[in-house]
Image: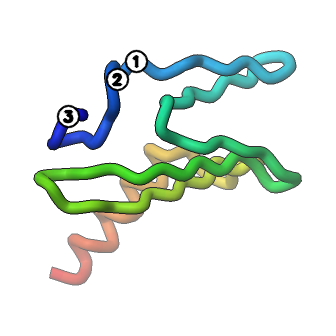
Amino acid sequence: MDKNTGFYMDTEPKVLHFGENKVITAFRDSAVYEDDTGFHTERRMLVDGKGFYVKSFFPSAPKATPTNQLIKLIENDAKMK
């Protein structure tokens, strides 16, 4: 196991195809499931020997792109300074 990433073996994800134009990546040590609202991923990982539990959510109908959300976060952070 890589002590920095927590991955076992390789770090190449599997690419899962769902219907037309839907793709999600999955790693060996993660769980991926879908419900009415979107895709959920869960995994445990190690970074510098510290354990983390990471859960991500990808909505079926996002209200904004990840880039737009990141820009909004940066702008809000700049306003607080």
- Residue tagged by mark 2? 11
Q: Is residue 3 above or below residue 73?
A: above
Mark identifier at residue 29: none
Q: Do the residues under discs 2 and 1 have CB atoms within 8 angstroms?
A: yes
Who comes first in sequence, dot 2 or dot 3?
3
Q: Is residue 27 above or below residue 48?
A: above
In the picture provided, is 48 more to the left or to the right than 46? left
- Residue type of the residue flagged with mark 2: Thr
Residue 29 x/y as whole percent:
47, 38
Query: In terms of secondary structure, where does tag 2 sit?
Result: loop
- Residue type of the residue flagged with mark 3: Asp
Who comes first in sequence, dot 3 or dot 1?
3
Q: Nearer the viewer, residue 42 or 70?
A: 42
- Residue type of the residue flagged with mark 1: Glu
Q: Nearer the viewer, residue 71 or 37?
A: 37
Q: Do the residues under discs 2 and 3 have CB atoms within 8 angstroms?
A: yes
Residues packed near mark 3 inside 10 Å, few (<14), some (14 to 19) or many (20 plus): some
Query: In terms of secondary structure, where does tag 3 sit?
Result: loop
- Residue tagged by mark 1? 12
The image shows a total of numbered marks equal to 3
